[in-house]
Image (spheres, rainbow, N blue to C red):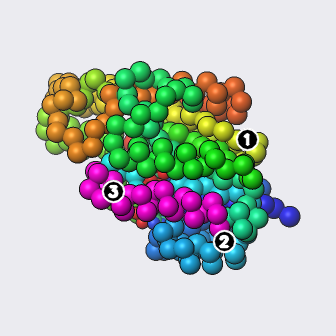
């Protein structure tokens, strides 16, 4: 009998890509869960409404579905929202993780795969490895560190922690902007844009991240994995690539330092990952930023 995989936050950017990928693999019973109704609206999986902060709802769903594997993607992922309400950020990003783990274990869970962030690092070093020192620069990163810590204490079932970085991709029915569509929109209207040129990331195509997550489940591996794209870029370099690809004038893109903007929740300057562990152990193979950009701007959701 196929194993059951349950995804939290299935309406989100990663959640939608993961639901599609796991469904297409035909290996698992896929249970996609999210707040409210199903926004992906495709065939081949079962969608259930589950607010991860509602313990009764979590109990009902996990008792009824008995997942062997949980991908915990749901979170408050906006830095500003976590800064504004620390208690709510802890409730959503930490307490709910604890509840899912506990209730999952009571219902036969074998493997818990948790989505964490490059924002657990302070941004002084860049191209981080899994065992580098964590030092979150904002409360969002702090909540992710707290969940990592509680999961790393778990001894009864397999735990994998996936840290990722600046995820981009297509998402259905979600009012969400990304740097590519923002650059396209502004430059096509002839507007000038100021873009940061001293922050570094390894932007991650959501389809690649979903692939990396699926490899972790298929191989049943434990531990921390950094899974991102392979190009080390500043937002300014990204904006230039987008403009050139769309034949828009680059003269309206003005490079500035991050200190030009007032931040609500400090962003780390240099993050990004080498992905070496994921390359070696998982045989993870991300596409280039250029290819990811083509998928997003071309509207192609197929991987
Ligand atoms: N995107 C990035 O650049 C990035 C970078 C590093 C790490 N991550 C982490 O990767 C994971 C996936 O990120 P993403 O980009 O897919 O985020 P996303 O698009 O914001 O999706 C998160 C999903 O979680 C859902 N959610 C939030 N609170 C919930 C609750 N109480 N109950 C049920 N669902 C809830 C949201 O529901 P609604 O749609 O209803 O709001 C949303 O659909 C997150 O854990 C994030 O912290 C993301």
Does residue 288 appear in the picture of this structure?
Answer: no
Secondary structure under badge 1? loop
Residue occupying the point 26% across, 56% down: 84
Residue occupying the point 64% across, 47% down: 153
Spatial distance from mark 1 to mark 2, Cα to Cα? 22 Å
Question: Would you say 244 lies left or right of 101 here?
Answer: left
Depth-wise, is mark 3 or mark 1 nearer the camera?
A: 3
- Residue 13 vertical placement versus 8 (above, below): above
Q: Is there CB contact under 8 Å for labels 3 and 1?
A: no
Question: Would you say 221 lies left or right of 284 here?
Answer: right
Q: Dot 1 surroundings within 10 Å: few (below 14), some, or many (20 or more)?
A: some
| Residue on which the image places disc 2 | 62
Q: Is there CB contact under 8 Å for labels 2 and 3?
A: no
| Residue on which the image places disc 3 | 86
Q: Dot 2 surroundings within 10 Å: few (below 14), some, or many (20 or more)?
A: many
Q: In the rendering, at what x and y percent does residue 112 appear?
A: 66, 53
- Residue 121 vertical placement versus 300 (above, below): above
């Amino acid at each position: 009998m196929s194993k059951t995989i349950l995804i939290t936050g299935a309406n989100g950017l990663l959640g939608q890509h993961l639901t599609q990928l796991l469904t297409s693999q035909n290996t698992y019973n896929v249970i996609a869960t999210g707040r409210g109704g199903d926004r992906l609206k495709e065939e081949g999986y079962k969608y259930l409404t589950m607010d991860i902060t509602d313990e009764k709802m979590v109990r009902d769903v996990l008792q009824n579905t008995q997942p062997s594997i949980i991908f915990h993607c749901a979170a408050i992922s906006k830095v500003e929202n976590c800064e504004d309400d620390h208690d709510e950020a802890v409730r959503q990003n930490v307490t709910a993780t604890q509840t899912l783990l506990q209730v999952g274990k009571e219902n036969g869970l074998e493997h818990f795969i948790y989505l964490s962030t490059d924002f657990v690092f302070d941004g002084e070093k860049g191209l981080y490895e899994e065992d580098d020192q964590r030092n979150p620069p904002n409360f969002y990163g702090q909540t992710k560190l707290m969940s990592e810590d509680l999961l790393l204490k778990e001894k009864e079932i397999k735990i994998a922690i996936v840290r990722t970085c600046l995820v981009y991709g297509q998402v259905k029915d979600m009012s969400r902007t990304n740097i590519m569509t923002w650059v396209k929109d502004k430059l096509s209207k002839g507007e000038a844009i100021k873009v940061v040129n001293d922050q570094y990331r390894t932007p991650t195509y959501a389809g690649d991240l979903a692939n990396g997550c699926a490899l972790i489940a298929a191989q049943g591996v434990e531990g921390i994995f950094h899974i991102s794209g392979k190009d080390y870029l500043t937002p300014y370099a990204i904006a230039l690539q987008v403009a050139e690809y769309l034949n828009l004038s680059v003269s309206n893109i003005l490079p500035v330092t991050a200190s030009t903007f007032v931040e609500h929740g400090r962003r780390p300057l240099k993050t990004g990952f080498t992905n070496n562990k994921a390359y070696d152990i998982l045989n993870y193979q991300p596409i280039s930023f250029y290819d990811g950009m083509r998928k997003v701007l071309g509207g192609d959701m197929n991987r």
